[in-house]
Image: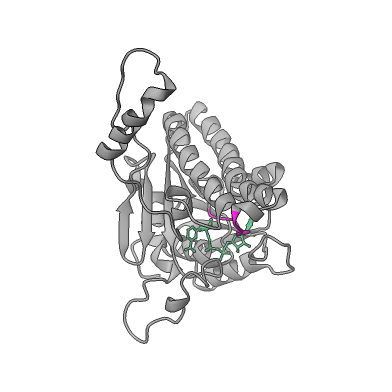
């Protein structure tokens, strides 16, 4: 624990923090001085239940290094579970300053083969799993603000390139992650009045979720920088969780290795307005002109 304690005295919830990127966030927040609620229900990669308790292992690591942490096993997409998670932070550590929404799983399939159950499960865990925790945390922060107590709180959501640019074979996951990007904008606009900023990241790192995608970089390099180490994602998230980021809200950052990029989302683009209704047959050349003059879309992953 030799880094600057930029999150000293802050209480942080990290969801899905038993493994992968969430685990790296929990360890990094603890190393920056935060008290951490390590949430993880301990699912398999496809969301199936297991008997594993990775949250406790991460808590043990933090405590062994001299930090403060407590485990939580609630399902983030369960309404009462999300409420209990927020309550546990407040009851255990006396408040809540940062919510990092990170938990989730994948059930990849081409849209033409995707089942209703696979759609519902992935939308639920990511999109509802972000909303449910954020909703209960926001209610807590609004209560604090109304009671006249200073709130300097943060939400950091986890989107994905699959949501920002699209990804073949990940229609359910990409839709949930695009939803999270949109939810971040509205939440940032609504929660500012309570002293809460809301930002999101689109990370890329080697975890069980991406083992096959990043197969060529599975082995860490013999020496030097391992660009796909999940721990590379956490410094920006810790900074966003600190008091120093108070001016930053409603933003999306793409993070990978040593790279931090500010993503540009949907914007109003080039337009033609004739001030009257169009006849459908007239629109071919109009659309062709817009596409010719407008910006090229980013390529879809895997296309
Ligand atoms: N790894 C990448 O390159 C990458 C890229 C883009 C986005 N992401 C996103 O980053 C986040 C972390 O992914 P990861 O790669 O570390 O995956 P991971 O599978 O290693 O970790 C996800 C954790 O979430 C937990 N979890 C699943 N459902 C849960 C629930 N309902 N409640 C509580 N915990 C639950 C799992 O048990 C697991 O420990 C995810 O939101 C993922 O979509 C990852």
Towards the viewer: 1 or 237: 237
Rendering quadrant holding ligand 1: bottom right
Residue 44 visible within the image: yes
Residue 239 can be seen in this image: no
Main secondary structure along the magenta-highlighted residues: loop
Q: Residue at x 68, y 51 (%)?
A: 121
Report if residue 108 lies within the magenta region. yes
Which residue is at the front of the view, 245 or 223?
223
Q: Is residue 228 above or below residue 84?
A: below
Above or below, 302 relative to 298: below
Q: Is 160 placed left or right of 112 in the picture?
A: left
Splitting the image into 4 quarters, where does residue 303 fall?
bottom left
Magenta span includes 85: no
- Give the residue at x 39% y 18%: 278
Q: Tell how many labels.
A: 0
Identify the image quadrant of residue 292.
top left
Q: Where residue 187 sits in the image (x, y, percent)?
A: 48, 35
Q: Is residue 226 left or right of residue 132?
A: left
Q: Quadrant of residue 219?
A: bottom left
Residue shown at the point (67%, 63%) measured from the top left: 42
* Image quadrant containing the N terminus: bottom left
Q: State the image coordinates of residue 92 (x, y, percent, origin top left).
A: 61, 51
Decide which of 14, 20 is in the foreground and name it. Answer: 20
In this picture, which residue range is highlighted in magenta? Answer: 102-110
- Between 303 and 79, which is closer to the camera in this rendering? 303
């Amino acid at each position: 624990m030799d880094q600057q304690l930029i999150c000293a005295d802050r209480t942080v919830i990290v969801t899905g923090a038993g493994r992968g990127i969430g685990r790296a966030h929990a360890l990094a927040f603890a190393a920056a001085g935060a008290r951490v609620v390590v949430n993880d229900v301990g699912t398999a990669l496809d969301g199936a239940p297991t008997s594993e308790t990775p949250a406790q292992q991460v808590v043990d690591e933090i405590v062994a290094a001299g930090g403060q942490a407590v485990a939580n096993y609630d399902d983030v997409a369960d309404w009462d579970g999300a409420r209990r998670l927020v309550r546990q932070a407040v009851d255990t550590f006396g408040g809540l300053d940062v919510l990092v929404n990170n938990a989730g799983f994948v059930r990849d399939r081409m849209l033409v083969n995707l089942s209703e159950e696979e759609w519902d499960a992935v939308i639920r865990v990511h999109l509802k799993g972000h909303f449910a925790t954020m909703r209960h945390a926001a209610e807590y922060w609004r209560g604090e603000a109304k009671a006249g107590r200073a709130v300097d709180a943060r939400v950091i959501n986890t989107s994905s390139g699959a949501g920002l640019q699209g990804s073949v074979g990940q229609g359910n996951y990409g839709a949930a992650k695009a939803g999270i990007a949109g939810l971040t904008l509205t939440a940032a606009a609504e929660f500012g009045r309570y002293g809460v900023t809301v930002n999101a990241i689109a990370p890329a790192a080697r975890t069980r979720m991406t083992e096959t995608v990043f197969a060529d970089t599975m082995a860490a390099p013999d020496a030097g920088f391992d660009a796909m180490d999940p721990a590379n994602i956490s410094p920006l998230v810790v900074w966003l969780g600190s008091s120093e980021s108070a001016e930053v809200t409603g933003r999306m950052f793409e993070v990978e290795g040593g790279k931090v990029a500010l993503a540009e989302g949907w914007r109003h683009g080039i337009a033609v307005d004739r001030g009257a209704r169009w006849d459908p047959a007239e629109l071919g050349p109009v659309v062709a002109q817009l596409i010719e003059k407008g910006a090229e879309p980013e390529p879809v992953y895997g296309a």
